Amino acid sequence: MKKILIVLLLLSFSFVLTGCKDDAIEEPIPEVNCDLFPDSDKCKDPVVIDTDPICLETNLDCIEEVEQLISNMNLLQKVSQMVQAERGNITPEQVKQYGIGSILSGGGSHPSAYNNTVDDWYEMYETYQDSALLSDSGIPIIYGIDAVHGNNNVYGATIFPHNIGLGAANDADLMYRIGMATAEEIKVTGISWTFAPALSVVQNISWGRTYEGFSENPSIHQNLTYDTIMGLQHYGVSANAKHYLGDGGTDNGQDQGNVIQDEETIRELHLAPYYEAVRAGADTIMISYSSINGDKMHGSDYWINDVLKDELGFEGFIISDWNAIHQLPGDFDDQIVASVNAGVDMLMEPYDWENTINDLFDAVLQNRISRDRIDDAVRRILTVKYNRGILDNPYDRLDEDDYFYTQEHQDLAREAVRKSLVLLRNENDVLPLSKSENVYLVGPGMDNVGYQSGGWTTYWQGNTNSDIGVGISILDAFTRELSQNGANVVSSMSQADTVVVVLTELPYSEGSGDNLSLTLTTGNSHSENIDALNIAIEAHNAGKTVVGILLSGRPLLLEDYLQYFDSFIAAWLPGSEGGNGISDVVFGDYDFTGKLSFTWPLNISQIGYTSNEENYDPNSVLYPFGYGLNYLN
Ligand code: BGC
Ligand code: BGC
């Protein structure tokens, strides 16, 4: 049955986004120019709903329902709401026994197999939800998942470009639509919470999570954050801004490292996007593993309570990162006390959730955490559950046929790819290529949708076997375009005047992507890049036109190789529709519009040099922030 649960009449949007408060009418929905974007969902009629609208007109119902629940809960039930377990480590029976507040799927944590269907996912969700409703408190769980570029854990989902590419596109309306499409692909599984968007303002591309951030420059985050969150939450999925605060600013770009900066700089660079997240009414914010000047963020009363909750007025709930409180000083009970008193409302404890519930309970009995603090955390969590419709309609889901890997979503992802590509070099206007001339296509990235999607695809570290259930590789798309025009992708250099070389990094996520060398041939780069580069040199010397396409989660040092390429495209990690979007611009059906959201360094000593420098010299680097060629100009 086609069941549209989600959203609300346009009128109700602002109430939902701002939580249970009386003055909830605040932000109008951002305006879209409907002449320019007739297909934008904001230009269509509001989505029809067949569930009860939530928090309409007055939010008194919301307040009443949440307060009623809290007043009927005992301490154990309350602290259980504040804990999140990983699906692989908790049974439905335990969910019933403890009335735990939340469950997550870690990266690549599927119900039973990597290629589980949407229905398998829903069944798992439903089973846990059944158990939660049978618990003493009877409160439904909120289930969280890392849908960071589409609903990427689910086999066959539309995979959008990673954020680095979307930062190059820098198109707020596009972000709204991607948020919406992602929300739809999540809601087909029943789930209604994603640990996205990452708002990392990345200062050093050595960091393995560079691609999860939009840019080195917070101006891009300021442009994109609001719409990204609105897109998700308007369509029924709680957003989670992460990782607060300064994850992108660690020394040497070390994952989970230490930010060494004065407060003013930290505010200007790293706090800036969070104003937008709060303005958008983000339901949740995740704390960063990293430290600021030696102090772990998970214990920071100042940055969480004082700045985020009091100064910025964040009203949603705060979640810790995976096992992260274990890195605080002291025993586990001290770590729980420190983080909860610093303002963390829910503890992501994938393995130790049971101890967490017990220790949290004891800490309250010992007066180490006040009952008011517990009520505040539970109130925040239940309000989010109310606002996303989980309390009243825990089983809502969208119909797979209408909302999962639809043609509309594929077209949107393809548009995102086109807009994310940055043309770095185009000597003698060798691009666009003609569709009626043979092309010799080489390189380890030319036929692999897994590489093209990067980390957080099917598995936590990404998928190297290229089976993500869907997707169009560069080879697929080029073959289609050329064969429709009487030409072909050929298998030897002598058969073509143009050689297209697709270089790639191997997929990685988090710390395994930390890399201090960043060349095309070392670190996370594919070992076969070297053969492809040798072909580029040979082709160049033979007088062929040589076009380079780089699939990567960040700028890589091009060293002396650049001279052998007539044209060079930064394609980032374009996702499942990468082949289509790339062929759209390479063959000239569309022009390039993407601009670098990161400085492209000339050499290793420039890594860490960004457009945020006071005396930024765009001429000193290979390609500066904001750079990008196109066909017309
Ligand atoms: C990452 C988060 C992620 C969480 C859950 C952590 O390791 O830092 O970004 O949301 O795991 O998978
Ligand atoms: C999980 C990820 C998580 C990571 C943290 C992995 O096993 O799948 O979700 O972010 O561990 O280290």
Image (cartoon, rainbow, N blue to C red):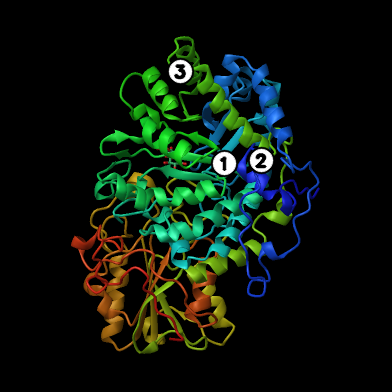
In the image, the residue with mark 2 has its CB under 8 Å from the nearest atom of ligand 1: no
Asked if the residues shown at circle 2 and circle 1 are in contact, with their CB atoms under 8 angstroms apart, the answer is yes
> How far separated are the C-alphas under marks 1 and 3?
24 Å
Residue at 59% over, 43% down: 238
Q: Amino acid at mark 1?
A: Asp
> Residue 320: x and y, percent?
45, 33
Q: Which mark is drawn over residue 283?
A: 1
Judging by the rendered image, the residue that carries numbered circle 2 is 388
SS for dot 3: loop
Count of numbered circles in the view: 3
Q: In the drawing, does residue 536 fall left or right of residue 397? A: left
Residue bearing mark 3: 369
Amino acid carrying mark 2 in the image: Arg
Vertical relation: 484 (above or below) 154 = below
Amino acid residing under circle 3:
Ile
Quarter of the image where the C terminus is located: bottom left
Answer with left or right where residue 557 lies relative to residue 306: left
Q: Is residue 222 above or below residue 195?
A: below
Residue 575 pos. (x, y %):
50, 60
First of labels 2, 1 by sequence position = 1
User: Which residue lies most toward the left here?
Assistant: 605
Whole-angstrom CA distance, mark 2 to mark 1, is 9 Å
Answer whether residue 112 is visible to the viewer in this image.
Answer: no
